[in-house]
Image: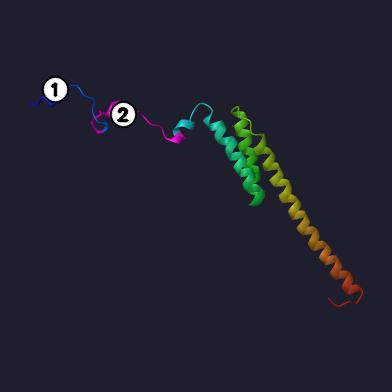
Amino acid sequence: MSSYSSQSRTPYPSEQPFAATPSRKSPAMSFAGPGHEGKRAAQLSIAYGVLGMFLFWFVFGPMAISSANKAERMGESAAGGRLLGWVAIILGVLSILMVIGFFLMFAAGLSTAFENGIPA
């Protein structure tokens, strides 16, 4: 046997036993903790609120408010998500009222045009 194997040396990283390797957590695992669900619900409420401002306000607005309520039940502040949810709902309702108003004004203009004999 050679004298090299009897000498004390630090092993290469590939020779380290499995248990001696440092444990590395993934970024998702480092976020997990006691308030994980509350933080996630607060972040989701903001995301749903932003989506509700641009897409499907009637779906994402109530989801933002619901997620904000869930986050606040778990002790996290989610006022921004709740606010965005309500703003999305209000803007959606106002846009529908504006479209209905436009069509009513258009129909009223056509009816007066026909009453006065002006061709449309």
Answer above or below: position of 120 versus 3.
Answer: below
Residue 6 pos. (x, y %) = 14, 22
Marks 1, 2: nearer the viewer: 1
Residue on which disc 2 sits: 21
Answer above or below: position of 106 versus 11.
Answer: below
On the picture, is 44 further left or further right than 26?
right
Give the colouring mode of the picture: rainbow
Residue 54 pos. (x, y %) = 65, 51
Q: Is residue 18 magenta?
A: yes
* Residue at 44% across, 33% down: 29
The number of discs equals 2
Location of the N terminus by quadrant is top left
Q: Is residue 52 magenta?
A: no
Residue 61 pos. (x, y %) = 66, 45
Camera-side residue of 114 and 9: 9
* Residue at 74% across, 55% down: 96
* Stretch of the chain drawn in magenta: 14-28
Answer above or below: position of 52 versus 21.
Answer: below
Camera-side residue of 109 and 54: 54
Comes first in the chain, label 1 or label 2: 1
Describe the element under mark 2 as helix, strand or loop: loop
Location of the C terminus by quadrant is bottom right
On the picture, is 64 further left or further right than 10?
right
In whole angstroms, how far apart are the C-alphas of marks 1 and 2? 23 Å
Residue 100 pos. (x, y %) = 78, 58
Q: Amino acid at mark 1?
A: Ser
Answer above or below: position of 92 versus 39.
Answer: below
* Residue at 84% across, 70% down: 110
Q: Amino acid at mark 2?
A: Thr
Q: Which mark is residue 6?
A: 1
Describe the element under mark 1 as helix, strand or loop: helix
